Amino acid sequence: MLLVTRIGQKTQKLVALVNKNISQENVKVELASLFDLSFVIDTGKLIVKIGVTDIKDFDLVYIRRAGTTSTILANTLGIYLKHEGVAFFDSVFGEYSAKGNKLRSLVQLALNNIPVPKTIYFANSENYPDYQYLVNELHSPFIAKNIEMQRGKGIYLIKSNSDYEFLLQGKKKLGKAKFFYQRFVDKNHEYRVIVMGNEATIWYEKFPSNKNEFRYNSALGAKEIYYDLKNIPKELKEIAIKASRCLKQEISGVDIVQDKNTNLFYVLEANRSPGFELDENLSPEVKTFSDFLKRSVCGDNQLKI
Ligand SMILES: Nc1ncnc2c1ncn2[C@@H]1O[C@H](COP(=O)(O)OP(=O)(O)O)[C@@H](O)[C@H]1O
Ligand SMILES: [Mg+2]
């Protein structure tokens, strides 16, 4: 069994005493830090290790002390262990809660078989993955994404070892800043699908502010072209609805890119409380949102919450 916690002298002593008390050949408590966790996330397939050991090799995982900074990490681990059927305490860590970050959402999406770009995360900010390892796993260039930022901030395209070194230097200065590394999807389209309840209600394509910008965020000047809902590809619609529902969101703005080589769709994120264009001449969002609220109150929504 494994006890994941903050390692201190007291915990070490506790483990030594417990092992002495149990005194059974095949039952042994091991101690590890939450920050020894690493995640390799792919659609429907995750590998979570603690140090070099697959966490599924343990019969029981006791997530003991998770400070405020590591609660989301502990929750991410709990959600994974619950999904994989590995016994763990405290069971509250397996419940999906409102406080999260990009890593936890991505794990939730991947566990639910929603297509996401392959992503690697090391929880220990002193123990960076090797540049060459990342290139082998994700190809070059790859994306570095701050797990706590939004609106295109903290997202970098890493094209060389020196880009990576530069990022790591900045990261040290930022202290708590944390990145995951993600395959860069060479995209020919990027869409946003607005999901309300169990329906895709609006979809539009995003176009970057200039051809060298890989981040299609409206906060960075990206433009939107709204399309007729009748023409939304079935797969795009289904992926968006599934993503929104599995994150337990009734209203989502789902960012989906299309790989130009394979035409496959990948969900980048499903934003809670997406921004709406307030000029009703430009966008149907305010009207659609109002209708949805009205239907929710009047009780004729087919919401499966
Ligand atoms: N893996 C990726 N492949 C290609 N483009 C990406 C990838 N991740 C992010 N981007 C680009 O960066 C933008 C911002 O990333 P996103 O994950 O949506 O975070 P946020 O919008 O919260 O900053 C996306 O809209 C997309 O244009
Ligand atoms: Mg986004």
Image (cartoon, helix red, strand yellow):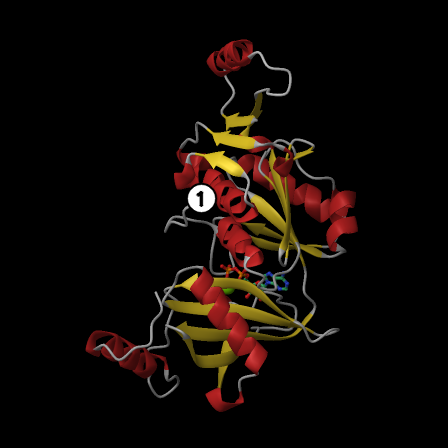
> Could you say which quadrant of the image residue 128 lies in?
top right
Query: Image check: 249 left or right of 129?
Result: left
Residue 53 spot, x, y in % from top left: 68, 33
Image spot of residue 252 (x, y percent)? 41, 68
Residue 267: x and y in percent read 57, 65
289 above or below 132?
below
Judging depth in this view, the residue of 146 and 250 nearest the camera is 250
Residue under label 1: 94
Name the element at disc 1: helix
Label 1 crowding class (10 Å Cα cut-off): few <14, some 14-19, many 20+?
some
The residue sitting at 59% across, 33% down in the picture is: 124
Is 191 in front, or is 26?
Answer: 26
Q: Amino acid at mark 1?
A: Gly
210 with respect to 294 (left or right): right
Residue 32 percent across, percent down from the top left: 57, 25
Which of the image's four quarters has the N terminus?
top right
Residue found at x 39% / y 83%? 283
Which residue is more in the foreground, 256 or 11?
A: 11
Question: Residue drawn at (53%, 42%), measured in percent from left and top?
Answer: 81
For the C terminus, give its image quadrant: bottom left
Q: Is 264 drawn above or below residue 171 in the view shown?
A: below
Farthest left residue in view: 298
Question: Do we see residue 206 in this rendering?
Answer: no
Q: Nearer the viewer, residue 263 or 143?
A: 263
